[in-house]
Image: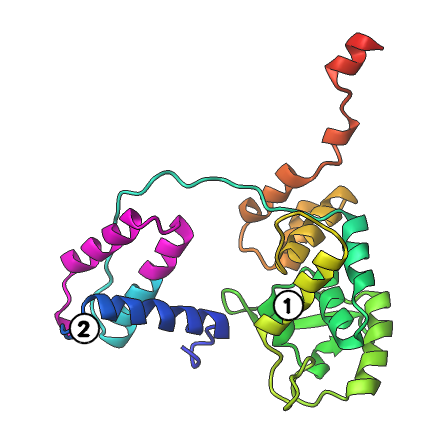
Amino acid sequence: MEIQRYSNSTISTYKTLLTYFFRHFKGISPDQITKEEILDYLAYLVERGYSLSMQNQVINAIKFFFEKILERPREYYHVDRPRRERRLPVVLSKEEVREILTQVKNIKHKCLLMLIYSGGLRIGEALNLKPTDIDSKRMLIYIRTSKGNKDRYVTLSNHLLDILRIYYKAYKPQNWLFEGPNGDQYSYRSSANIFNRAVNKAGIRKQVSLHTLRHSFATHLLEDGTDLRIIQVLLGHNSTKTTEIYTHVSCAQIQKIRSPLDNLLD
């Protein structure tokens, strides 16, 4: 998977899901597991209430193992599942993002959150950055091997560049832009804890995660009039259909509508 440039998070997820899969068939050699038994396992996950996205990840992990490792023919695994719920992502207002950033005093931590929001990055993309990926002359950030093994550029904020320069002088990162105490890659858990602490200090009660900064980035761009196609490119989406979900989250047009109750009572 590393050779094929799978992300660290995908590798970790596949390892975990396959571990549970093999435990389910304890005592049976993997090459003896049949398609019917795999379908039974997937039906078992449905009964256990696994989400549709988790079911899809399990299928992808199983397909990778049997088709790439054991070199079995490609298979299609169909399981009757409830219709997928279409839930809109939670989005922070610009004021809420500003308040969260205000709560972060550590320069490295502030840089990390500012970078994720300003470029609409996935956390894995931010943690995989190297100092040389910051192109201050062209005001671009180079995102390597993002989801789908695609490289892309995102814009570099002037404010972010200023604080990155202060951070770089103070910490002097070598291999990774954000490094742990031993010079290794900064962890996802530490990054999430930074965000969660700032959210709590800001008194925000929305159910949010670090990924909410990416959703907020896209929604704020859309509300500021940025073309959907440009937002798609910045996010690294394959299709505008994925990006179109932010048209349902944006409140810019909804807020312009006058309620019929106001028209009635005014």
Measuring from the top left, give residue 53's x and y in whole percent: 42, 53
Measuring from the top left, give residue 76's x and y in whole percent: 25, 55
According to the picture, the residue beneath numbered tag 2 turns out to be: 30
Q: Say whether residue 172 is visible.
A: yes
Q: Nearer the viewer, mark 1 or mark 2?
A: 1
According to the picture, the residue beneath numbered tag 1 turns out to be: 193
Q: Where does the magenta region start and end?
A: 30-59
Answer whether labels 1 and 2 touch (C-beta < 8 Å): no
Decide whether residue 214 is among the magenta residues: no
Quadrant containing the C terminus is top right
Residue in the picture at 27% in, 47% down: 47
Q: Is residue 182 left or right of residue 16?
A: right
Measuring from the top left, give residue 224's x and y in whole percent: 79, 45
Magenta segment, principal secondary structure? helix
Please, is residue 82 above or below residue 193 in the view?
above
Q: Please state which of residues 27 and 167 is positioned toward the viewer in this rendering.
A: 27
Quadrant containing the N terminus is bottom left
